[in-house]
Amino acid sequence: MEPALKTMIDNMPAKTGKSLTEWKAILKEANLAKHGEMLKLLKGEYGVSHGFANTIASLYRQDDAPEVDLVAEQYKAKEKLLPIYTALMEQIEKLGDDLKIVPKKTSVSIIRKKQFLLLKPATKTRLDLGFKFKNRPLGERLAASGPFGTMCSHRVCLSTAEEVDEELITWMKEAYEESV
């Protein structure tokens, strides 16, 4: 922990009237989702200074915020795409033990030493699989990255789990091998 943060936490009871643990309990009880809402509560209702309120809210969100299943949230309104995601993940997990699977708000990054795949439910009927290749020509199925920009060099648009075929699996393996 940084010395300045430790000092702030140590001084919190004297400066705000409550310990960090007590403030976290208040935020948990309030059940607020957004940082700004937490600041408004702490500053407005409890008179906490901005610096302390920001620290309390940040530490609460970092440590005690309810965990959200980001993948479930991505597919909540796109259930038809979940079998495609599941088929992809079954193959991705076979690539190696050195993978890091990082769900985000709208996508899932697959990382080795660097990101080499990106899974994104693009529409209600299409999941985009982005690839990071060094020098691979575009084709009819393996197209330009589109909305992924520089995050990926190529993408494949999938609308059924059956499209997770040998060709696609080979491309995933090649992207994995290039990501060292």
Image: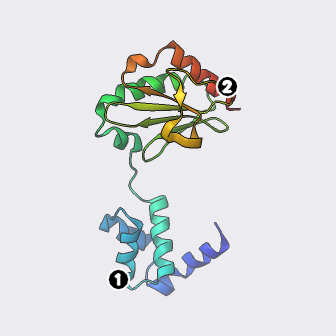
Foreground of the two, 50 or 160: 160
Write down the quadrant of residue 99 in the picture.
top right
What residue sits right under mark 2 in the picture?
177
Q: Taking 59 as reference, is 77 left or right? A: left
Foreground of the two, 137 or 18: 137
What residue sits right under mark 1 in the picture?
44
Give, as a three-letter code, the residue at label 1. Gly
Write down the quadrant of residue 44 in the picture.
bottom left
Q: What residue is shown at x 43% (from left), y 84% (from top)?
A: 17
Disc with the residue nearer the chain's start (1 vs 2): 1
Q: What residue is shown at x 35% (from left), y 62% (from top)?
A: 33
Give, as a three-letter code, the residue at label 2. Glu
Q: What residue is shown at x 61% (from left), y 28% (from top)?
A: 97
Colouring convention used in this rendered image of the protein: rainbow
Disc 2 is placed on an element classified as helix
Disc 1 is placed on an element classified as helix
Write down the quadrant of residue 113 in the picture.
top right
Residue 70 % position (x, y): 40, 44
State which quarter of the image contains the C terminus.
top right
Tell me: residue 46, above or below residue 123: below
State which quarter of the image contains the N terminus.
bottom right
